[in-house]
Structure formats: structure tokens, C-alpha cells
Image (cartoon, grey):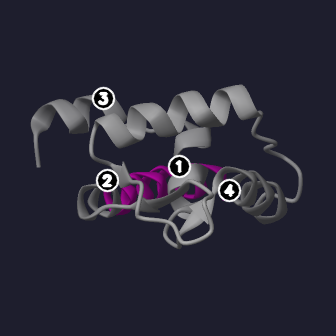
Amino acid sequence: MDDSLLKKYIPMTETTYYTLLAVTEKRHGYAIMQFVNELTEGRIQLGTGTLYTMVGRLNADGVISIPPSEDGKKSYLITEIGMELLEIETKRLEEQLDDGKSILT
């Protein structure tokens, strides 16, 4: 993986992290917003401006792709590079949580 992508995306913003979780399955924009809202129980509500700016950047960087669509809706899907970034960030968050628990408990 390109070091510039690691520097750009790790640590990852919360909205980027949840968007990448959403596109582990092919989803269009509104479905991404619904998925994130449901997964976080309303804690994170993506706005359309935030989402479409972010997916444009993620697509340009090769983190997500826009697969061909049968229904005319633009959908998004995580790429291999995106999955690798998501796994790296998840591991980083697990380590951070473990460190916090070791001090607080």
C-alpha cells in the first residue's frame, strides 16, 4: 500500500470509518446514510454534503469504487485497498481501547 494513503487515512475520521463499514456491501448514498444511522443508533447522521464529498475523495483515492449499476443508482463498494485501511484502523482502535481499559479498570 502507498504510504501516502496510510498518512492520509490513518487515523481515520469516524465518518470515514463508518462509511467504509457501510460499503463492505454495495450501497447507494441514501442506503449508506441509513446504515450508518442504524449501526450507530443515531449517534452519527451523515448529511448528503458530507457523504458525497467524502465518497468522491475515497473514490479518487481508490479506497472505494463505483461498480456498474442495473437500476441507474450510483452505488459504492470498498476496494481491496479500502479493506486493508479499514482493517488497519480497526486494529488501531482495538489497541487504543485496550490501553484505555488497562488504565481505567
Above or below 89: residue 67: below
Left or right, residue 92 beside residue 31: left
**Viewer-side residue, 32 vs 28:** 28
Name the dominant secondary structure of the magenta segment: helix
Say which label, 4 or 1, has the lower sequence index. 1
Q: Which residue is mark 2?
A: 85
Quadrant of res 53: top right
Q: Which residue is mark 3?
A: 8
Q: Which residue is mark 1?
A: 17
Query: Which residue is pictured at 30% across the width and 29% down the height?
Result: 8
Q: Is residue 37 magenta?
A: no
Quote the CA–CA distance across marks 4 and 3.
22 Å
Q: Amino acid at mark 1?
A: Tyr
Q: Secondary structure at mark 1?
A: helix
Instruction: Where is residue 80? Give x, y as percent.
Output: 25, 64
Say which label, 2 or 1, has the lower sequence index. 1
Quadrant of res 49: top right
Above or below 56: residue 1: below
Question: Is residue 10 visible to the viewer in this orientation of the structure?
Answer: no
Q: Give the farthest residue toward the left.
A: 2
Q: Which residue is mark 4?
A: 32
Q: Magenta span covers which residues?
A: 86-105
Question: Is residue 40 visible to the viewer in this orientation of the structure?
Answer: yes
Q: How would you rate the neighbour count of disc 2 (Cα within 10 Å): few for under 14, some for 14-19, many for 20 or more?
A: many
Left or right, residue 31 beside residue 23: right
